[in-house]
Amino acid sequence: MTQPSAKALVPFVSVDNMMRLVNHIGIEQVLRDLATYIEEDFRRWELFDKTPRVASHSDVGVIELMPTSDGEAYGFKYVNGHPKNTSEGLQTVTAFGLLADVYTGYPVLLTEMTLLTALRTAAMSAVAARYLAPKGADTMAMIGNGAQSEFQSLAMKAILGLKTVRLYDKDAAATEKCARNLSGTGLTVVKCTTPEEAIRGARILTTCTADKQNARILTDNMVGAGVHINAIGGDCPGKTELASGILSRAQVFVEYPEQTRIEGEIQQMPPDFPVTELWQVLAGTARGRSDDRQITLFDSVGFAIEDFSALRYVRDKVRDTPYHTDLDMLADPDDPRDLFGMLHRASL
């Protein structure tokens, strides 16, 4: 049988190889690297094709495709969000992604993105906090201690110099899990029994809960002046975490308004509710935090350009390493017009 040519082989990064790659580089260095790639792409935001993710909703969750292109490379992520999965011993979120060469249309990378999404989401939160959090903020409340919580905490440590994380989850076992995983990382970990206790003394507040409902994880009277909020749990219609009064008092920053107004915290607000696009802050065309008493809010729902950045990073890092396998997934006949002949000869 004819062997596939090198140009037809597509590097594939499995879950096992992703774990090997991250552990080889070091998770905090990976988070710093991803932040660099994200900032690079946000500064050239206007070059990208941009569209809200294509979502297929059901009674139990959502399945989404998130595509974008900078004109040279094309990337997409397949991702689901099923909050009920946890009770069935399954992940709430799973994902895979692909990066392709625009010139040929050939894929150049296929990779797991469940781990990679957790890493890029955490790096994105830390990028936002670097530009929006009060100067010297070194304590974070981590409300929602599920699969994202350790990544969020370590990203803030690696990129902002976070020293203390105060944990709260309605499920005490989740808090115990997070505290156990963060032991030995250099962070001071405080386990809290209420969200009010968790935000005490914290100037960065991160909410990351999974329930698909209009929740009020933070009520209006819980949030005072001089804090930055990363709201990352609300990511689909009908799913929020913050009281609308907080949004009314905050300067709100978003990734892509057309998507965030449907999926983010600002779905609670009028269609003309003012927001600032975060890429403009990174590009220097809009202002971030204006004073120490301001409330800043990054209403993060995740956007395809962040996944594109993560795919670029993995492509660059696995090249000429053992952290991938080559998949024979593209038909590549000697004569591009003779696909049938390739099939027929394989039977002889």
Image: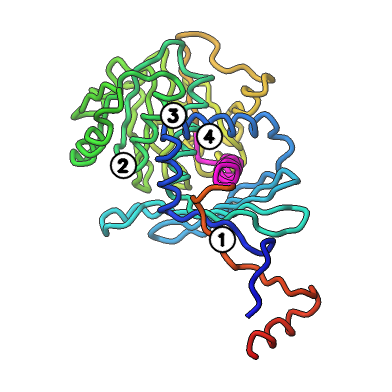
Reply above or below: 211 against 27.
Answer: below
Reply above or below: 165 against 346.
Answer: above
The residue that label 4 is drawn on is 34
Callout 4 amino acid: Leu
| Alpha carbon distance from label 1 to label 2 | 33 Å
Q: Main secondary structure of the magenta part?
A: helix
- What residue is shown at x 44% (from left), y 29% (from top)? 230
Q: Residues within 10 Å of mark 1 (few under 14, many from 20)?
A: some
Callout 2 amino acid: Gly
Callout 1 amino acid: Asp
The residue that label 3 is drawn on is 230
- What residue is shown at x 28% (from left), y 31% (from top)? 182
The picture places residue 307, in percent across and down from the top left corner, at 56, 44
Callout 3 amino acid: Asn
Q: Residues within 10 Å of mark 3 (few under 14, many from 20)?
A: many
* Foreground: disc 4 or disc 2: 4
Of labels 4 and 2, earlier in sequence is 4
Label 3 element class: strand
Residue 74 magenta-drawn?
no
